[in-house]
Image (tube, coloured by chain):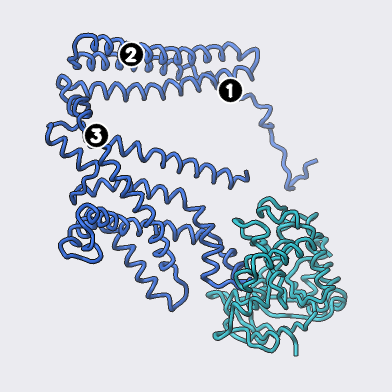
Amino acid sequence: MAVAGGLVEEPAEPAIQRLHPIRTHLGRSIVVLTAGLVVAGLTAVALKRFYDSLGVVGTALTVWAVGLALLAATVAVVLAACGAMAVARSVQSGRLIPEDRVAARAAGAAATDWTWYVAGLSVTALVVAFLAFFLSANDGAVRHQYLDWDAIQEFLPSLWKGLWLNIKVFVVAEFLVLIWGLILALARIFPGKAGRPVRFLAVAYIDVFRGFPAIITIYLVVLGFQAGQVPPFTELQGETKLFWLCTTALVLVYGAYVAEVYRAGIQSIHWSQTAAARSLGLSYAQTMRYVVTPQAVRRIIPPLLNDFIGLQKDTALLSVVGLLEVLNRARLTSNRLFNLSPNLAAGVAFVVITIPLARLTDWLVARQARARAGG
Amino acid sequence: MAFLELDGVRKRFGENQVLHGVDLEVDEHEVVCLIGPSGCGKSTLLRCINALEEIDGGTIRIDGEQASGRGVDLDGLRQDVGIVFQAFNLFPHMTVLANVTLAPRKVLRLSRKAAADRAHALLARIGLDEKADDYPDRLSGGQQQRVAIVRALAMQPRLLLLDEITSALDPELVSEVLNIVRELANEGMTMLLATHEMSFAREVSSKVCFLDAGVICEEGPPEQIFGDPQNDRTRTFLKRIIEAGRL
C-alpha cells in the first residue's frame, strides 16, 4: 500500500489501460500513391526524351526502344503496386479497429512500411529520370561528350596500361606509408621531458605535410628533386626515377595522415594496459612493441583503409608531373578526340579499384562492432 | 629492518593532495591489509610503491634499497614488486599463456620453452592450465583475475601488491581468487593488499592499516582494528561496513 508522502506513488490512471489511438496512415498512403504515379509518368517522359535523342538507326534502335520501354513500364508497375499496397493495408487497418486492435495496429505499421518503399524507389526513379533528361539535352550532345563508346573503346588499351602504373604506385606507397607513419606516430608521442624536441619535430612535420596541398608537395618533390639532382634519385633513370619520385611524394604526404591515425589508435589503448606491462618490468619500448601497438593496429585498420582509399585516388594527381598514369592518358586521348568519355572511363576505373577496399573497411567495422557487442 | 619502508610519502594530482605523508612498514613474509573509504588513497599508495606513479615527497625503500626518485632502476624494481589490478588488465590480444610468459621471456630473457614450462606449472596450480591457449575474453572474471595473479607470480616477485582484486568480481567468483591469496600467504609471500573484503583481511593479515584522507590513521593487528578500534574515523568506517552487512 502506498504511504502518503512516501517514495511510491500510484498513478491516477495506469498507462496500460488507456486506449491509444490507432494510426492507419491512410492520408500518408494516398499521398504516396499519387506521388508514385506522378514520378512514374515523369520517368516515362524522360526516357522517351532520351530515346529520341539517341539518333541510332536500324536494329540497335529497336533494342533501345524495347529496353527503355521495359524500364519505364517496370518503374510504373512497381511504384503503383507498392503505393496500392500501402493504401490497401491502411484501409484494412481501419476496418480491423473495432474487431482486433492488435491486428489493426500491425496493418497500420505495414502500411507505413509500404509508403517508405514507395518513397525510396521514387527517389531512385527521379535520379534515373534526371540523368535521362541531362544526357538527352541538346539532341544528345551531352551524352556524346560523356558516353561515346567508340572513344572509350579506343582508350581502353591505354587505360589498362595507365591503371597498372597507378596500382603499382599506390601499393608501394601504402607499404612505405605504413612504416613511415608508425615512425612519425611514435616520435609524436615520445615520452618525457627529454622527448620534447623529438615530439616537436614530429608535430612540425605532420602539420606541414598535412597542411600543404598534396599537389604542391608533388610538384616540389618530383620536379624539384629532378632539377636539383637530389640523391639517391639521380642514380635512377627515366621512368624508374619518375616512379620513385612520385611514390616518395605520396609517402611524404600520407605519412602525415597515417601518423595521426596511428597516434589516435595508440592513445585509445587504455593506460591500464601500459600500467600492467610496465609493472611486469617491461621497458617503455617493449610495452609499445608487444602490448600497445599490436592492439592499436587492430583498432585503426578501418580509418587506415580510409586513408588508403584517399591515397589511391590521389595517384591521379601525379598526372601533373608527367607520370603516364591513367588520368594523364585519359586526358591525352580526350584532347585528341575532343571528347570527355575517356576521362569518365578513368574515373570509373578508380571507383572500381576503391570499391573492394571500401567494402573491406565496412566489413571490418561491422566485425569490430560485433566484437565489442560481445560476440 | 622492514622489507618495505615508506617514510612520509606524499602524492598530489594537480590541486588534489592524495597522500599526506604515509609511513608504513611491511616485514618479509608479512601480509598487510590497507582498508579505508573509497578515494582515501589506497590504490594510489600501491601504484606509488610500484613506481607507476611518481611520488612528490618522502622515500620508499625496498629491502633497504632506495626505490623512489630519480636514479632508481624502475624496470629492475618492478621485477621484484608485482602488482595485480582491480580490473585484471590482462592483454586482450594474447592468449593466457602469452600473457603469463611475455615478461619472463622479454625481461628475464628466459627461453620460450622455459617460460612456458614455468607458466604451465603455475597455471596448473590454480587449475587453469587447460585455458592456456584461450584468450582472456573467453574466461570468467574470476579466472581472469587468477591468471593476472599468475602473470605477476611468473616474475617471481619478492613483494606482491594487490589492488582491490575482488572488487570487480561477481560475489560467487570472489572466493576462488581469495583462496589463491590465502595460499600465497601460507607460503610466506610478502603482500600488501588494498581490500574491501573485511573478513578476509581479518583472517589473513598480520597487520591492518586504516587509511583515511591520505594518512594512516590507525594500524595494528586485525583483532585490535576490527575488535577494538581506537580512532574515531576507524570506528565510523567500520560501523558503516557493518551496516552494509559486510563484516
Q: Which residue corresponds to the image point at 20% horizontal and 16% vertical from the top-left?
A: A54
Q: Is residue A331 visible?
A: yes
Check disc 1 and report its element: helix, strand or loop.
loop
The numbered mark, 1 or 3, whose residue comes first in the sequence reads: 1
Q: Height in image: B140 above or below B188?
A: above
Check disc 3 and report its element: helix, strand or loop.
helix
The numbered mark, 3 or 2, whose residue comes first in the sequence reads: 2
- Across and down, in percent, residue A209 comes to 29, 60
Position of B193 compared to B16: left or right?
Answer: right
Position of B199 compared to B159: left or right?
Answer: right
What's the chain of the residue with tag 3? A
The front one of A97 and A131 is: A131
Q: Judge if badges 3 and 2 mark residues of a common chain.
A: yes
Task: Pick the quarter of the image with the N terminus of chain B.
Answer: bottom right
Q: Which chain is blue?
A: A
- Residue at image mark 2: A72
How many numbered circles are shown? 3
Image mark for residue A366: none
What's the chain of the residue with tag 2? A
- Residue at image mark 3: A157
Q: Colour of chain B?
A: cyan
